[in-house]
Amino acid sequence: MSDSQQAGTVRIFDTTLRDGEQAPGCSMNLQEKIEVAKRLEKLGVDVMEAGFPASSPGDLASVKAIAGIVKDCTVAGLCRSLEKDIDNGREALAQAASPRIHIFLATSPIHMEFKLRMTPEQVLEQAVSSVRYAKKFCADVEFSAEDAFRSDPGFVCRVFGAVIEAGALTVNFPDTVGYAMPDEFAARIRYIREHTPHIEKAFLSVHCHNDLGLAVANSMAAVGAGANQVECTVNGIGERAGNASLEEVVMGIRVRKDYFGVDTRIDSTKIYGTSRLVSQVTGVKVQPNKAIVGDNAFAHEAGIHQHGVLAKRETYEIMTPESIGIPRTRMILGKHSGRHAFEDRLKDLGLQVDKDTLELVFAQFKDLADKKKVVSDRDIEALVMGVSAAAPETWKLDHWAVNTGSALGASGTVRLLHRDGRSEKLVSMGDGPIDSIFKAINRIIGKDPELELYELGAITGGSASQGESMVKIAWEGRHWNGRGVSTDVVESSIKAYLSAVNAMEWELSAGKANGHV
Ligand code: KIV
Ligand code: ZN
């Protein structure tokens, strides 16, 4: 192990903003990516992969923005093994305190023959020359052998040895298609350690996909076999069945420190809040029985279990909810609660807001508490997200009304205020109240984005619950999410639609300013 490698520590390389974000339905707007990046920094990830700068002007801009803000961890940009991608990566990471260029090139026979149309020797040569090129501007270069698990192990060792000689400080061994079994994967990692020239000069990383539900198991097996970086995503989001879930990898290593003899730098008490944030911004719900962060992860239903936990917690709990940031006892928040109690709850939930946001959210909390007896943690998260991850409001809801019934079509009226001060009002007919209002909004904004997803749910149970709406819209090949909450479901839907529209308007105008659109 080189001096730069800390014995006993496994690096956590988070790729929520790249592999996670590129999964269907997980896209985030710039503001949301920045919120997630700030939270990952506080969580203590060693590296965050902020995006794939050459993939789109939007990705380049978001990696640039994150690189300018995040200071306490390495920010990586993914690049194909091409000079033009590496140039984009260099531009995007120029402001980063600790930049990393992450280059990938496939090494499996099937990828080399059918996707790259290159011979193994050409792949080896291109891998080395791209690492050499990146090293001219960036000291920290990682090389990934895409589809490494289905590659010839001897060939991967040759490629890894050559890129380490060219200056790569990390070599990553992905199971790109989630094909490996844990004992085979561990054996392969041992083989790579034993047969790669100068492997001691580099970090050996793994990156597992979850096609057979084994991404975490394979990552843990690799740690046991000597991998010292794990690539993962919050809530396990990612291509197809997803990536290894960060929270499961981190808590697996921590709870079984006796077994692995290593640990990570992660502040586990920030895990729950980060998981909630990623779920909120992507609109991808966490399944109730998900390990570590699912709603039922610490719920004991059976009488025997309840009795055991009451007598001694460790009978059925191998970690505490507090250790991942779920406070066990809470005061109820309602209309008599003051600012102090509200601020304390934000802290408990890991929600850090500036003074202005606090004022706004507290006022909204008071309004909500007037309508509902008890304001839940989920309500509070939704209020904070609605303010802090929202794009600046080009359009603001002033007033709405709908008229609907079983015999008539629906009509919707909406009045919006534009940030330049003008007010626009329109009535539209539609297929139900939501459709009529969305059509009226489209006519006001002069665009007709495709509604890719519309979801309506209740934040908590009971008829006093707030309605939470999620929409995804697409316009000219780009996608935006919006969320809205209100005790009225039509209003929550309008708010969600407007927040997606505002994200679109903001990014399109920022793009124009940068000459991208
Ligand atoms: O799954 C994969 O192989 C990847 C690489 C780009 C690291 O995501
Ligand atoms: Zn991947």
Image (spheres, rainbow, N blue to C red):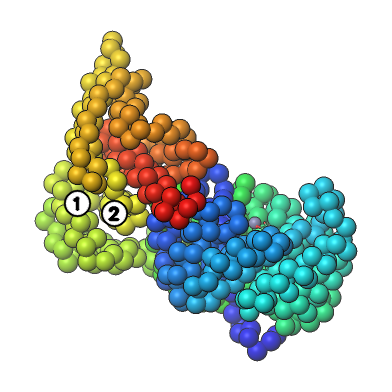
**Does dot 2 land on a helix, a strand or a loop?**
helix
Q: Earlier in the sequence, mark 2 or mark 1?
A: 1
Residue 64 lies left or right of residue 351; in this view the side is right
Decide which of 486, 58 is in the foreground and name it: 58
Residue 388, above or below 26: below
Confirm if mark 1 falls within 8 A of ligand 2: no
Does the image show residue 14? no
Residue flagged by tag 2: what amino acid is it? Val
Does the image show residue 371? yes
Q: Which image quarter has ligand 2?
A: bottom right
Q: Which numbered dot is residue 387? A: 2
Residue 169 lies left or right of residue 100; in this view the side is right
Residues at discs 2 and 1 in contact (Cβ within 8 Å):
yes
Residue flagged by tag 1: what amino acid is it? Gln
Q: Which of the 4 image quarters holds residue 172? A: bottom right
What is the C-alpha distance between the residues marked 2 and 1? 10 Å
Q: Which numbered dot is residue 364? A: 1
Q: Residue at x 43, y 50 (%)?
A: 512
Q: Residue at x 56, y 77 (%)?
A: 263
Decide which of 287, 361 is in the foreground and name it: 361
